[in-house]
Amino acid sequence: MSEGSVFVPGSDGRACAVYKDAKGNTRYLYAETKTEVRRKLRQALKDRDEGLIPPSKMTVANLLDEWLEDMGGDVSHETWLNREGFVRLHLKPELGTKRNSAR
């Protein structure tokens, strides 16, 4: 199951795909047809391989890490260290685990 499997598990007729995420956890996707669930599986595997986090799993800590990484070459090292310290000491402990609540 290294790249995922597609099957129709139960009586409801929905198709299911199963795959391993970047952390090795088993993930399931569902859709009305095998074609649709294969499309979802391909996208999930592509996102996994590119290191992308699904919006529903994105936390403030993930966003802040990306922000710090993106600014790396645009500011002085001293400025980056100042911002990294602020994020690590003040923002992540209070807000780091918050997720997007809009759905």
Image (spheres, rainbow, N blue to C red):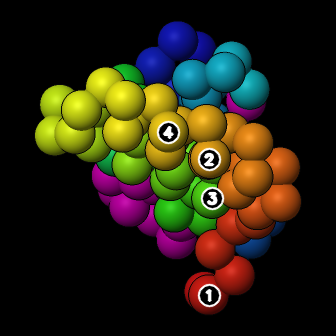
Q: Nearer the viewer, mark 4 or mark 2?
A: 4
Determine which residue is flagged by label 3: 60
Mark 3 or 4 closer to N-term?
3
Determine which residue is flagged by label 4: 82
Along the viewing direction, whichever of 62 and 15 lies nearer the viewer: 62
Image position of 61 with respect to 56: above or below: above
Q: Nearer the viewer, mark 3 or mark 4?
A: 4
Image-quadrant location for residue 5:
top right
Asked if residue 102 is among those painted magenta in the image, a careful observer would answer no
Mark 3 or 1 closer to N-term?
3
Task: Find the distance from the CA under tag 3 to the CA under tag 4.
Answer: 19 Å
Mark 2 or 1 closer to N-term?
2
Mark 4 or 2 closer to N-term?
4
Spot occupied by residue 95 in the image (x, y as percentages of width and height): 76, 62
Residue 102's tag is: 1
Determine which residue is flagged by label 2: 87
Q: Secondary structure at mark 3?
A: helix
Image position of 5 with respect to 2: above or below: below
